Image: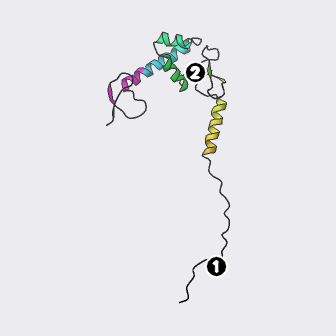
Amino acid sequence: MNLRNCSRCGKMFNYIGGQPICEPCKKAIEEDFQKIKQYIADNPHASLKQIAEDNEVSSKQIQQWIREERLMFAEGSPIQLQCESCGASILTGRFCAKCKATMANNLNNTFARPKPTLEQPVKKDNKAGMRFLDT
């Protein structure tokens, strides 16, 4: 049994894996997420600060949901996100579609199967092999 303290409330819980957060806190975070998601749908032109203040959720938590691609903003939103690789304007996540595709291709090329090489035929040397001593 792996016991840990919840990083949010401090209570001890049986840690299985993932974030070190207890089940009641996970449920509370998910409720906050649903509340934020609905607020953004109702107020598409709200700023990040306004969203955080009106819903009593930290802007850090909202930014995490954006990076995880759980939240997406409309084209006219005052919240401007930029691709961490090329700086292009994006609506959610960390990277634009072009950079994601490039990274995926690079990863696929890294783990691509090596091409079989043609083996050189082994030349037999008449002098090679077992030798016996004359006694």
Q: Which is nearer the eye, 95 or 84? A: 84
Disc with the residue nearer the chain's start (2 vs 1): 2
The 10 Å Cα crowd at callout 1, few under 14, some 14 to 19, many 20 or more, is few
Q: Is residue 63 above or below residue 135?
A: above
Q: Is residue 18 magenta?
A: yes
Give residue 78's position: percent from left, percent from top: 61, 13
Three-letter residue code for mark 2: Met
Secondary structure, mark 2, is loop
Q: Is residue 131 magenta?
A: no
Q: Quadrant of residue 67?
A: top right
Give residue 125's position: percent from left, percent from top: 66, 76
Q: How many labels were placed on the picture?
A: 2
Query: In screen coordinates, is 56 left or right of 111?
Result: left
Q: Quadrant of residue 127?
A: bottom right
Q: Residue at x 62, y 17 (%)?
A: 80
Q: Nearer the viewer, mark 2 or mark 1?
A: 1
Label 1 belongs to which residue? 127
The 10 Å Cα crowd at callout 2, few under 14, some 14 to 19, many 20 or more, is some
Three-letter residue code for mark 1: Lys
Give residue 17's position: percent from left, percent from top: 40, 34
Give residue 51's position: percent from left, percent from top: 52, 12
Disc number at residue 72? 2
Residue interval drawn in magenta: 5-28
Secondary structure, mark 1, is loop
Q: Which is nearer the eye, 31 or 92? A: 92
Q: Is residue 69 above or below residue 41?
A: below
Query: In screen coordinates, is 73 left or right of 18?
Result: right
Quadrant including the N terminus: top left
Q: Residue at x 47, y 16 (%)?
A: 58
Q: Residue at x 66, y 36 (%)?
A: 102
